[in-house]
Amino acid sequence: MTIQWFPGHMAKARRQVSEKLKLIDIIFELVDARIPLSSRNPMIDEIIQHKPRLVLLNKADMADKSTTKEWIEYFKEREIKALAINSHAGTGMKEIVSASQEILKEKFERMKAKGVKPRAIRAMIVGIPNVGKSTLINRLAKKNIAKTGNTPGVTKAQQWIKVGKELELLDTPGILWPKFEDQEVGLKLALTGAIKDTILNLQDIAIYGLQFLKVRYPERLKERFQLEDFPEDIVEFFDRIGERRGCLMGKGEIDYDKVTELIIREIRTEKMGALSFERPGQISNLPPAEEIKSN
C-alpha cells in the first residue's frame, strides 16, 4: 500500500513558512513522542535551514517514558534541545519558555549590547497535521485561540498569538511531505492518526499494528486479546481476535471490518498502554548536527 497525502493548502503553507522566517527567532518543531523520526518532516530542515530550534516531543504521555528519555538524549547528542510535553494536559509548558531563553541567550545579549530594546521571543510552530500544534498554542496562551480538532488538517492559515510578555507564536498549518520514501513512515503516521482514515486502507494499518505489537509488546497484545500464542496466518490472527471480542456477523462469521477498527482504536486510545513505535538507533532523517546548529 502506498500512502500519500499532500493537500493544496500544505504546499501554500510551505511557501508561507519560508516567507516568515526572517521575522522568527526560534522554531518550535513539534513531533509525536511515539514516532519522533517518522513525524519529522524532512522538508522542514530545508525550509528553516540554520534557525535555532527546540524539538517538542508531544503526546509524551502516550509514549514509553524510558524510550522518550532515549530520544531526548538522542537529540542532545546532535546539539538540539528537546523537551517531552503533553499539550493536552499542559505538562512541560513552563520549560518551553525557559529553554527558548537559554537557546537564544547569546542572540539577545548581542541585541542588548547594540542598544536594541528587550522584546518577546518570536517563535514559529511547525509540525505535521494532528500533532497538537493548536492545542499547544491554546495551552500556552491559556485560552482557546487556535482552532483544534482530532482531524488532520484543521489549521489552514497562519496567525500570531501573544503568550504573556515573553513569547509570541506563529502557528502554521501542518505540513506533510509529498512522498514518503519509506512506506513504513506512512504506516506509522497512519496508525497514530496523522493521516485521514478516509484515504487509507485501514486493514493494512491494522495488520501493521498487530505485527509491531507482536514483536515489541507481545505480552500486552496477548493480555489484551486473551491470546496464548500468535497465529502465523494473519486471517487466523483476525479470527481469534474477532471471536474473543465478539466482532461477529450473522451465522457467527467474523466481521473483519470491526476487527480492523477495534485494533486501530485500541492502539490509538492507549488500551495497550503507552507505546513507542520507534527508538533511537533507527535510520535518522535528521541532517548532520553541524547543519542544524544555529549560527
Image (cartoon, grey):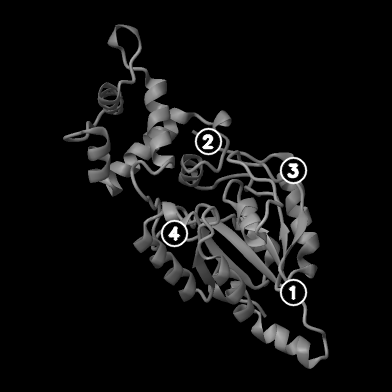
Ranked by sequence position, the earlier of labels 1 and 2 is 2
SS at mark 4 in the image: loop
Classify residue 18 as left or right of residue 73: right
From what the image shows, is residue 47 above or below residue 199?
below
Q: Which residue is mark 4?
A: 283
Give me the C-alpha separation between circle 3 and circle 2. Answer: 21 Å
Would you identify the image quadrant in which residue 94 lies? Answer: bottom right
SS at mark 1 in the image: loop
Q: Is residue 56 visible?
A: yes
Q: Which residue is mark 3?
A: 9
- Rate crowding at label 2 as few (under 14), some (14 to 19) or many (20 or more) other CA atoms within 10 Å: few
- Rate crowding at label 4 as few (under 14), some (14 to 19) or many (20 or more) other CA atoms within 10 Å: few
Give me the C-alpha separation between circle 2 and circle 4. Answer: 20 Å
Which one is closest to the eye, mark 3 or mark 4? 3
Which one is closest to the eye, mark 1 or mark 2? 1
From what the image shows, is residue 13 above or below residue 239?
below
SS at mark 3 in the image: helix
- Contact (CB < 8 A) between labels 1 and 2? no
- Residue 277's label in the rendered image is none
SS at mark 2 in the image: loop
Label 2 amino acid?
Thr
Outermost residue on the front side: it is: 143
Give me the C-alpha separation between circle 1 and circle 3. Answer: 29 Å
Label 1 amino acid?
Ala
Classify residue 202 as left or right of residue 211: right
Ranked by sequence position, the earlier of labels 2 and 4 is 2
Ranked by sequence position, the earlier of labels 3 and 4 is 3
Residue at 77% in and 93% down: 113
Ranked by sequence position, the earlier of labels 1 and 3 is 3
Q: Which residue is mark 1?
A: 120
